């Protein structure tokens, strides 16, 4: 694939020191090793990533632009919390982008090997109490959507979708531990695959709209109802 979500990316020796520091800190944030709301310093992150001060400083500037960290004057940085409004906005933006990528991929047609891989990925489920199965499910569902984006024929749109996935992954890591696997959502993902396979852009757009609306509702319900909200540093900002 041309564009990969961070969860599927691997470090490359040709990357600059700044790029490696950026990716390392970003993964720590997304995987909740650096928890929402935590205070960190450049010294902390230099030690954590085994990177130099300058690469870490430049990486933090990029992470500010990504909306993942904020500067605390004379006291370091804060890992920005997830808010209900932010989660709603992110899910709504995802829906706008992914309904378009699904329609375009259906119209253009996907490669047979991609369709085969997508069908394989549909078989992945998870148990809320099993972190390994959650990790496998996250990789599978984000790869499924990345394949669709990769086949949409619009590089700018595909890059935007992948950027949304990296933000969405953090939210999903917070919610999936309290959210039972949904047979309805699984059926909706399969409907997306079938409409793309059948090269029906109108049906693909509708199927992806149904799927992403259900996902948004499940995410928001989990954020508001779970007793782990306080532990996950969710800010109830509407």
Image (spheres, helix red, strand yellow):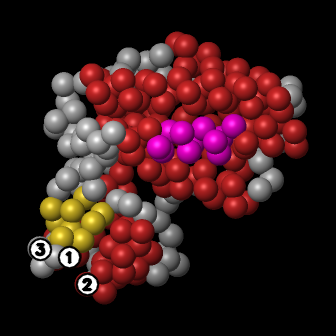
Element class at badge 2: helix
* Residue range corresponding to the magenta coloring: 89-99
Furthest residue to the left?
Answer: 75
- Residue found at x 67% / y 21%: 190
Q: Is residue 133 above or below residue 80?
A: above
Labelled pair 2, 1 in contact (Cβ < 8 Å): yes
Could you tell me how many numbered marks the image carries?
3
**In the shown orientation, is residue 72 left or right of residue 147?**
left
Q: Nearer the viewer, residue 35 or 70?
A: 70
- Residue found at x 43% / y 24%: 218
Q: Which residue is mark 3?
A: 75
- Residue found at x 35% / y 59%: 68
Q: Is residue 233 visible?
A: yes
Element class at badge 3: loop
Q: Nearer the viewer, residue 102 or 70?
A: 70
Q: Which residue is mark 1?
A: 42
Q: Main secondary structure of the magenta part?
A: helix
């Amino acid at each position: 694939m041309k564009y990969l979500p961070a969860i599927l990316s691997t470090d490359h020796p040709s990357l600059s020191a700044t790029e490696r520091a950026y990716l390392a800190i970003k993964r720590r944030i997304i995987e909740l090793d650096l928890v929402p709301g935590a205070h960190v310093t450049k010294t902390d992150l230099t030690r954590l990533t085994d990177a130099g001060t300058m690469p870490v400083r430049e990486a933090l500037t990029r992470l500010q632009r990504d909306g993942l960290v904020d500067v605390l004057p004379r006291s370091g940085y804060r890992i920005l919390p997830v808010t209900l409004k932010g989660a709603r906005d992110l899910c709504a933006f995802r829906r706008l982008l992914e309904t378009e990528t699904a329609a375009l991929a259906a119209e253009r047609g996907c490669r047979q090997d991609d369709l085969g891989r997508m069908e394989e990925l549909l078989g992945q489920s998870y148990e809320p109490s099993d972190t390994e199965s959650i990790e496998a499910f996250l990789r599978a569902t984000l790869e499924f959507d990345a394949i669709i984006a990769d086949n949409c024929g619009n590089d700018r749109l595909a890059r935007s979708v992948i950027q949304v996935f990296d933000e969405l992954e953090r939210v999903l890591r917070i919610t999936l531990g309290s959210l039972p696997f949904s047979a309805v959502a699984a059926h909706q993902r399969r409907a997306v695959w079938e409409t793309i396979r059948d090269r029906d852009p109108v049906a693909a757009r509708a199927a992806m709209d149904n799927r992403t609306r259900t996902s948004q509702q499940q995410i928001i319900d989990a954020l508001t109802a779970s007793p782990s909200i306080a532990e996950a540093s969710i800010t109830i900002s509407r």
